Amino acid sequence: NRSFGLVIAYLLPGFVALWGGSSFSDTLRSWLGAAADPPTVGGFLYVTLASIAAGVTVSTVRWAVVDTLHHWTGIRQPHFDFSRLQENIAAFDLLIEIHYRYYQASANMLVALAFAYAARRTAQGVWLGSLAWADFGIVLLEAVFFLGSRDALRKYYTRVAQLLGSGRTEKTDGGDAQGSRAPHQLPGEGRRGSH
């Protein structure tokens, strides 16, 4: 189950971002098997590692943009009582897997798909060209990922607050603590020393 969560949260969005980047790179195109030669084992390994790296990059952009947008538009992070974490660690891990990983997957795909779409349109030189049904499909997918990410994040915050308890919502200059959380902190962990 943990492997599945990591695949949907990082590997798949990273692969989508790589696919978009392959518009500008013969090397990426060959790794993805889009060139005339069949894909190799080395290419598969490279594309897997590159997808993970791209997925982590996409996730950092997601943290900076999508998390902040959600917090500015009404989804507030409760102040979790992490003194109760040790006795609830298994349940907390489960909530990460069934809610936060799906939030990451939806929000990361939102970012990755936007990047891939922009890269493809730029490579084709049709930024200002006419729109086709596929373009409207991309907009629809982006809306689905945005709404899905909002729902998953809201459920994650609600369920963790029920598990660990919560008090006031922490706020900082540009939003709440989650919006200013460094990427290496635990999901739900606010700024240190701001309690």
Image: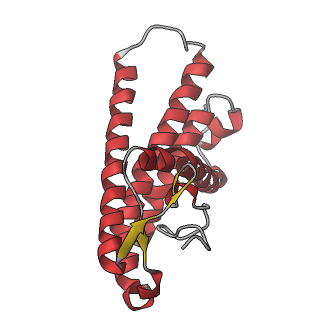
Looking at the image, residue 148 sits to the left or right of residue 26; the answer is left
Q: How many marks?
A: 0
Image coords of residue 87 (percent x, y): 39, 91
Image coords of residue 74 (percent x, y): 36, 48
In the displayed structure, 166 sits above or below 102; it is below
Q: Closest to the observer: 41 or 21? A: 21
Quarter of the C terminus within the rendering: bottom right
Picture quadrant where residue 146 is located: top left
Q: Closest to the observer: 97 or 178? A: 178
Residue at 36% x, 42% y is 145
Residue at 30% x, 70% y is 159
In the displayed structure, 64 sits above or below 181; it is above
Looking at the image, residue 58 sits to the left or right of residue 146; the answer is right
Looking at the image, residue 54 sits to the left or right of residue 10; the answer is right
In the displayed structure, 32 sits above or below 94; it is above
In the displayed structure, 24 sits above or below 145; it is above
Residue found at the very far bottom of the displayed protein: 87
Its colouring scheme is secondary structure
Picture quadrant where residue 17 is located: top right
Q: Closest to the observer: 21 or 140? A: 140
Looking at the image, residue 179 sits to the left or right of residue 42; the answer is left
Image coords of residue 15 (percent x, y): 53, 46
Residue at 63% x, 43% y is 31
Image coords of residue 62 (percent x, y): 53, 48
Quarter of the N terminus within the rendering: bottom left
Picture quadrant where residue 78 is located: bottom left
